[in-house]
């Protein structure tokens, strides 16, 4: 677990819960069980990709001035421009007032990240992949039937193919699936047939095995009435050649792979996985053994790659750079990934090299700090027209917050994955909030309620390790029973993400 938040988040994250409680304990709001909690504020409920709320609403002290910010996601163009300059988070000291003013509201930050991904999506991102490699991708072109399904009349059951009224004389040789086209039947004739086998021409119906019997002369009799066409799957019943089976943008699930194979496909045209380079920063990080002598274990190196893969990315490299400004500059400028993710170094301390590196290469800061706890000093920058960088705080839970706030919407758009349907659940317990910022709190889902978990500080992973989702707690907090937006974790949704493809 890293402790980089000591220098990454000097303005409040390391004191998140304690500071928030101290600031709001005198603002009572009755919960259902008589508990006094901060009055929930509004302004954090806009859709990720359609933020339309008033940036000042519910955030008088940490609002964003439209006159200076415009559409650049909270970075003042007069000071930043394309060179990514300006005051880095933390420059204002522990009060953090200037930083909070510049920071982007959480819903808007997610919308900016999604727009950045959509602007890149579709540019040289289409690939032809085998069915075995297509799971979890999005179709880049409609899936059109290459043949009729079924491509011939087939038996839906084991039994007999019969022609005309019974009783019937039964042929000695039956018809199995995979056999060549059988000889036509004549009236009064039957033949044993297996499920999936081609039905002989002139067949009236298929008589199920349990609905027929033979007499002492080996003639077949029906024990139930037969309806013409019974238990025959006619050619083209599911689709005709040329029919559109799925639209472009559909997620390739195991069922889609089966449909594609049945329709005659060996390969699919899909949107390739976004490529991600992960750069882990910090001289204090160990990769094995127990923490010792001021050194701590790197938690983000093991945590982030599988999480990024669960979000649909291809992790092309994981590099541990320490606190080396030149190594960071070289890694960023030589990367060919669609997205570079860094951990730590996003503040303005003596070894926080992310902002200086972005200024040095002339990057455009789209988001420079977000009004969310934990994870306030996260950032999103455009390095090139087709390349972005997400800077995550070094504290583990703060880094997860940054991952879900900025990297997830960007990767989702790059991969052309559908926007998840938003949903809310009532909180079983009241949750204290930050006075000005959104809070992301690990929860477990129990029935129709979300249960907030302890150990949710920015440096802690104990809560998120047990969680099913993160509750999006608006500024001011949420009372017991309040309907609160949930962010599902990939392995808890039961969807394609659980495969970590």
Image: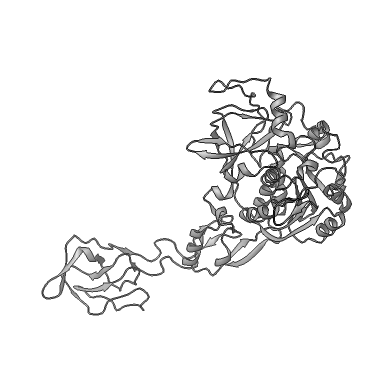
Q: Which residue corresponds to the image point at 35% horizontal and 77% vertical from the top-left? A: 181
Tell me: 270 left or right of 161: right
Query: Residue 87's x, y, as percent?
Result: 87, 39
- Furthest toward the front, the residue is 293
- Judging depth in this view, the residue of 470 and 216 nearest the camera is 470
Q: Quadrant of the C terminus?
A: bottom right
Residue 72 visible in rendering: no
In percent of width and height, residue 141 lies at 59, 60
Q: Position of residue 378 (x, y in %)?
A: 75, 43
Residue in front for this viewpoint, 183 or 103 = 103
Looking at the image, what colour scheme do you see? one colour
Count of number-bearing discs: 0
| Quadrant of residue 97 within the rendered picture | top right
Q: In the rendered image of this protein, does residue 95 appear above or below residue 182?
A: above
- Residue 258 x/y as whole percent: 48, 63
Kindly indicate the quadrant of the structure image that contains residue 21.
top right
Residue 458 to residue 410: above or below: above
Q: Relative to residue 317, is residue 485 depicted above or below?
A: above
Where 265 falls versus 137 (above or below)? below
Residue 336, quarter of picture: bottom right
- The residue nearer to you, when weighing 310 against 319, is 319
Q: Residue furthest left?
A: 216
**From this viewpoint, is residue 246 visible?**
yes
């Amino acid at each position: 677990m890293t402790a980089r938040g000591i220098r990454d988040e000097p303005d409040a994250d390391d004191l998140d819960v304690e500071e928030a409680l101290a600031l709001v304990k005198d603002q009572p709001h009755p919960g259902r069980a008589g508990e006094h909690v901060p009055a929930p504020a509004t302004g954090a409920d806009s859709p990720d990709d359609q933020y339309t709320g008033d940036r000042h609403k519910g955030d008088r002290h940490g609002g964003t001035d439209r006159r200076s910010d415009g559409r650049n996601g909270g970075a003042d163009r007069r000071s930043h421009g394309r060179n990514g300059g300006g005051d880095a988070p933390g420059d204002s000291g522990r009060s953090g007032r200037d930083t909070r003013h510049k920071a982007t509201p959480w819903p808007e930050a997610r919308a900016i990240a999604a727009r950045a991904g959509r602007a890149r999506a579709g540019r040289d991102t289409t690939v032809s992949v085998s069915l075995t490699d297509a799971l979890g991708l999005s179709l880049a072109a409609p899936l059109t039937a290459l043949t009729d399904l079924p491509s011939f009349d087939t038996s839906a059951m084991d039994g007999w193919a019969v022609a005309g009224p019974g009783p019937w004389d039964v042929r000695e040789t039956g018809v199995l699936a995979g056999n060549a086209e059988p000889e036509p039947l004549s009236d009064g004739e039957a033949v044993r047939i297996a499920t999936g086998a081609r039905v002989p021409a002139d067949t009236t119906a298929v008589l199920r095995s349990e609905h027929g019997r033979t007499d002492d002369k080996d003639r077949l009799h029906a024990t139930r009435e037969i309806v013409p066409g019974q238990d025959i799957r006619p050619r083209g019943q599911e689709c005709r050649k040329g029919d559109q089976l799925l639209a472009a943008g559909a997620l390739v699930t195991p069922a889609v792979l089966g449909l594609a194979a049945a329709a005659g496909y060996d390969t699919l045209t899909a949107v390739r996985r976004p490529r991600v380079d992960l750069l882990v920063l910090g001289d204090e990080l160990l990769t094995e053994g127990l923490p010792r002598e001021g050194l701590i274990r790197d938690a983000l190196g093991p945590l982030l790659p599988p999480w990024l893969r669960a979000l649909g990315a291809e992790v092309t490299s994981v590099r541990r750079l320490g606190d080396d400004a030149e190594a960071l500059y070289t890694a960023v400028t030589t990367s060919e990934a669609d997205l570079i993710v860094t951990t730590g170094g996003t503040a303005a301390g003596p070894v926080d090299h992310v902002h200086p590196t972005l200024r040095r290469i002339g990057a455009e800061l789209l988001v420079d700090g977000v009004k969310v706890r934990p994870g306030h000093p996260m950032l999103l920058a455009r390095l090139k027209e087709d390349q972005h960088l997400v800077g995550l705080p070094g504290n583990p839970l703060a880094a997860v917050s940054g991952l879900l706030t900025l990297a997830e919407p960007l990767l989702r758009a790059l991969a052309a994955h559908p926007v998840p349907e938003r949903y809310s659940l009532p909180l079983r317990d009241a949750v204290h909030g930050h006075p000005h910022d959104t809070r992301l709190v690990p929860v477990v889902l129990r029935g129709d309620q979300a249960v907030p978990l302890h150990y949710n500080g920015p440096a802690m992973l104990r809560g998120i390790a047990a969680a099913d989702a993160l509750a999006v707690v608006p500024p001011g907090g949420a009372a017991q029973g309040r309907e609160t937006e949930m962010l599902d974790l990939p392995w808890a949704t039961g969807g394609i993400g659980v495969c970590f493809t």
